[in-house]
């Protein structure tokens, strides 16, 4: 117990010395020279004592770098505003300095500090504003409004203050800011209002142009749901909640099934079956896609071994992979291990390249793809003709297949422009010796047109919906 008390005392003294040192620095006072008849072991500042004491008091509620309120003092001030501004509205705005880390790295921390000081100065220039620094790159502003309709105009004023160039040591730069805001009234909970402004700020960061965003209850529900699903995803794999459905791919000339696309499903214990677009973005943002993706690859390869055992013409199975799987995993090494452990043939597997992956044409990425192709694993460009996928990727990436996006295939029998575009894609595949698959085929007339245009392979609801493993095997046997 005595040791614990001594450690606590030393920790307290250390924090006190740090605080006093910061105050001396702010006061431009050298304590070693401040004698003035002081007793041994004591410091006397004479006439400066009152000023230092004042600064020491200020350090309780001020951010020492910018001079605005620190987090705790700003929170107390917000609480007081919500208690006393009866009948008025309290506008709470959160502003985040975008890419402050890059500024520190490129121009130095002196420049980054100067930027933060100037941000505080500009925000304090607002008449009636109380300004606080909540974290390293985040500021908050409160203003009292009599008319809630004035909130947007006030936010635009704040944005205009921050869009002017910043003159920093060694550079003059433009800086972008995310801005989120919420309106409160007398009696509202300050923590709740801070949370609302924080949710709005999060939405602003996600917007393409960092638009100022007002708190929206639906956004709060989405974020809460996202956080809950992220937590549930962490346990889904170990609880065996994932399963894979297979959608058949057919040869148009014969109607025979030649392969299938593996589509991940999540049997959530509360919300039921969840489609990929519901949880894959969350898995990618959280990094869980790496572990989930490895499980999918192993499971699909094992299923391919089961299905192709004794088949004269083996089926090929397509699996979507994300860019994060390439970055976090040595994918060729992972696949080599899976193929060796299952005794599967690499030609049974086709990896579908997603948009995020196609955006990365770095030598490292291309080298990894070439390694996969040398193993015999197929590479397919999904949703060809949309998003990042383009003709250039057929030249850069070592692909063996591309899938014509369903937006071109739908009503190809009725739309002349689609007819011409799909025909051109099919001929392009023939010339480059790249296999072409038409996605999203739903009608007999679409099948007839695709056959006439020379398309060899297709998939879509016309041939079969994604089904569980047992039903897919029954479809093959039938």
Image (spheres, rainbow, N blue to C red):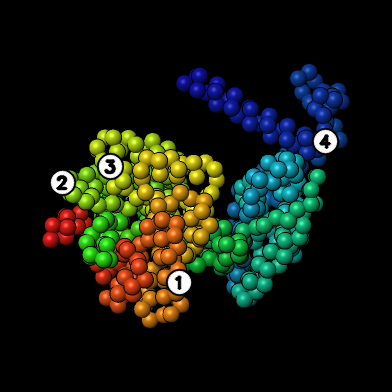
Instruction: From the viewer's side, name the closer residue of 144 and 97.
Output: 97
Q: Earlier in the sequence, mark 4 or mark 1?
A: 4
Residue 345 is tagged as: 3
Distance from the alpha carbon under mark 4 to that under mark 3: 74 Å
Label 1 environment density (alpha carbons within 10 Å; few <14, some 14–19, many ≥20):
some
Contact (CB < 8 A) between labels 1 and 3? no
Quarter holding the C terminus is bottom left
Q: Earlier in the sequence, mark 3 or mark 2?
A: 2
Distance from the alpha carbon under mark 1 to that under mark 2: 40 Å
Q: Earlier in the sequence, mark 1 or mark 3?
A: 3
Q: Quadrant of residue 413?
A: bottom left
Q: Which residue is mark 1?
A: 421
Q: Residue at x 35, y 66 (%)?
A: 455
Kindly report which numbered mark, 4 or 3, lies closer to the viewer in this rendering: 3
Distance from the alpha carbon under mark 4 to that under mark 1: 73 Å
Residue 28 is tagged as: 4
Q: Earlier in the sequence, mark 2 or mark 4?
A: 4
């Amino acid at each position: 117990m005595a040791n614990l008390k001594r450690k606590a005392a030393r920790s307290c003294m250390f924090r006190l010395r740090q605080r006093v040192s910061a105050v001396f620095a702010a006061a431009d006072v050298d304590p070693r020279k401040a004698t003035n008849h002081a007793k041994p072991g004591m410091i006397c500042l004479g006439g400066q004592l009152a000023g230092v004491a004042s600064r020491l008091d200020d350090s309780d509620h001020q951010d020492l770098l910018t001079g605005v309120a620190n987090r705790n003092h700003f929170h107390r001030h917000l609480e007081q505003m919500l208690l006393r501004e009866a009948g008025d509205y309290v506008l709470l705005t959160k502003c985040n300095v975008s890419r402050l880390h890059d500024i520190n790295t490129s121009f130095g921390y002196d420049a980054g500090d100067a930027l933060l000081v100037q941000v505080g100065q500009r925000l304090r220039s607002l008449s009636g504003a109380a300004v606080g620094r909540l974290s390293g790159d985040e500021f908050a502003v409160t203003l009292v409004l009599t008319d809630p309709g004035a909130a947007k105009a006030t936010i635009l004023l704040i944005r205009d203050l921050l869009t002017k160039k910043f003159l920093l040591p060694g550079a003059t730069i433009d800086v972008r800011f995310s801005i989120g805001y919420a309106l409160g009234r007398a009696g509202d909970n300050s923590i709740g209002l801070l949370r609302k402004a924080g949710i709005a700020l999060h939405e602003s960061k996600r917007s393409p142009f960092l638009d100022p965003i007002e708190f929206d209850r639906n956004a709060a529900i989405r974020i809460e749901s996202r956080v809950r699903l992220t937590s549930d995803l962490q346990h889904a794999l170990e609880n065996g909640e994932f399963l894979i459905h297979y959608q058949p791919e057919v040869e148009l000339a014969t109607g025979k099934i030649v392969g299938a696309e593996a589509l991940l499903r999540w049997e959530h214990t509360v919300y039921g079956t969840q489609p990929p677009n519901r949880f894959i973005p969350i898995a990618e943002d959280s990094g869980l896609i790496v572990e989930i993706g490895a499980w999918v690859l192993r499971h699909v390869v094992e299923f391919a071994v089961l299905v192709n055992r004794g088949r004269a013409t083996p089926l090929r199975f397509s699996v979507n992979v994300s860019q994060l799987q390439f970055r976090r995993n040595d994918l060729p090494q992972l696949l080599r291990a899976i193929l060796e452990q299952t005794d599967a043939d690499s030609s049974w597997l086709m990896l579908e390249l997603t948009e995020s992956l196609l955006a990365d044409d770095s030598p490292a990425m291309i080298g990894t793809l070439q390694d996969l192709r040398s193993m015999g694993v197929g590479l397919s460009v999904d949703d060809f003709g949309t998003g990042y996928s383009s003709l250039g990727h057929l030249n850069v990436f070592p692909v063996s297949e591309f899938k014509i996006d369903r937006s071109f295939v739908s009503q190809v029998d009725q739309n002349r422009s689609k007819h011409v575009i799909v025909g051109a894609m099919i001929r392009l595949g023939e010339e480059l010796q790249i296999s072409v698959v038409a996605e999203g085929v739903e009608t007999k007339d679409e099948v007839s047109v695709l056959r006439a245009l020379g398309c060899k392979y297709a998939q879509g609801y016309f041939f079969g919906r994604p089904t569980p493993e047992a039903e897919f095997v029954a479809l093959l046997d039938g």
